[in-house]
Amino acid sequence: MSEVTNIKLKYGNDYHTVSVPTKNIMDIIIPEDLPGVPDQMEEVRRALREPIESEPLSVLAKGKENVVILCSDITRPSPSYLLVPPILEELNTAGVTDDKITVVFGLGYHRPHTEEEKKKLIGEEVYRRVKCIDHDRNNCVYLGQSSRGTPIWVFEPVAKTDLIIGTANLEFHYKAGYSGGDKALMPGVCSKETIQANHVMMIRPGTMPGKADGNPMREDIEEIGRIAGVKFIVNPVLNSNKEIVKCVAGHPVKAHREGCKYIDMMYKRSIPEKADIVICCPGGHPKDINLYQAQKGFENASYAVKDGGIIILFAKCGEMLGEKTFEDWMFRATSVDDPVNWIQEEFVLGAHKAVVICLVLQKKKAYLISDIPDDITRKCFFEPAKSVEEALEKALAKMGPEAKILVMPYANSTLPFVEE
């Protein structure tokens, strides 16, 4: 009997112990949170006092008659209520009064906010002090084209302002490398046409989480930000408890890259080579509430497995697929190539997750252990299995008894990479 290593993996709200042959384990990789700062608003003030590759905001804002602060919408964990008050202090110091300042919530493709939601996002006091409005995709001004051919349509109040300040928390983005930086403007406050043209780049080489430079989607976003005139950013880095561990401010690209180093420190993990088999667990509820959410860990795992290799996804998915458009595309597809082809004809939000899954499945095989019925699992191009051990037995039969196995117990927040 060969020796096994028992590993605890979270499935919904429960833990399951899975047994993996010890001799095959290449590594078990987990993220490591940095501690939150003692005073979060003071950390934002410190970042504003020490801007990266930029003049201080109080200098940039001198003489400005119309200033816009871009903030994330309700679907993002960005703590705008901590970021905006210190920004207002800087603007007031520069002589910009509250009546010359507008907070614009970047909705991208999402629904408008209620007034209560705006208050919650920004804080009651700021909501009373300055004008707070939602971006409107249908009220945009044309500013030209990016070098990659993206038509640039920006929300009119943003396009016609003297100074644009972008805010958002930093985290991995499934295709644009990272959130934050110029993403506050694109897709935040752009038209549907602009967002679609940029998002179609998701199928191009170099678009992936944890990669900013040399990523066509991110580079297009930053060119659009430059053309539209984003001058200054304030981006906090949050740990998994949503506490600020570091805040960066200043130049939209240089400050952004500095902040990304802290994301990498917590969530990027170096591996010596790609594995034959990756056991991937999103990390339990709510990360595995449905396949739409669990996809994030599945994609992260794909960067650790060889082409022709196997991913074993252990995700409860009690709410099944979790998103109507995603489900429609998966059920309609007759092969993994279909969604990848369809998205090039028209970018559809929600369907993009079907595309990301299918891009992985074009090159790797996958087993899914979940609450999703077997016939639906197969419709999504996964092979169903009753347990991780059953899937592993089949995977080892395919990949050989010496196959190297990597385990990712918190795959949604762990990004593996092979050092070049």
Image (cartoon, grey):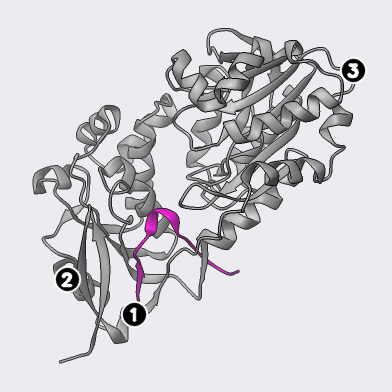
Please provide percent x and percent y for residue 276.
Answer: 34, 71
Compute the Cα span from label 3 to label 1.
Answer: 62 Å
Badge 3: residue crowd in 10 Å (few <14, some 14–19, many ≥20): few
Placement of the N terminus among the 4 image quadrants: bottom left
Compute the Cα span from label 2 to label 1.
Answer: 14 Å
Please provide percent x and percent y for residue 28.
Answer: 39, 73
Circle 2 is placed at which residue position? 389
Give me the residue at 28% from left, 54% from top: 284
Res. 335 in view: yes
Residue 150 lies left or right of residue 345; in this view the side is right
Q: Residue furthest top?
A: 139
Question: In the image, is residue 333 above or below residue 390?
Answer: above
Q: Tell me which amino acid carries mark 2.
A: Glu
Please give the range of residues in magenta: 402-420
Residue 35 lies left or right of residue 86; in this view the side is left
Give me the residue at 14% from left, 49% from top: 371
Sequence order check: which comes first, mark 2 or mark 1? 1
Please provide percent x and percent y for residue 231.
Answer: 78, 30
Q: Tell me which amino acid carries mark 3.
A: Gly
Circle 1 is placed at which residue position? 25
Please provide percent x and percent y for residue 23.
Answer: 31, 87
Sequence order check: which comes first, mark 3 or mark 2? 3
Label number found at residue 409? none
Circle 3 is placed at which residue position? 63
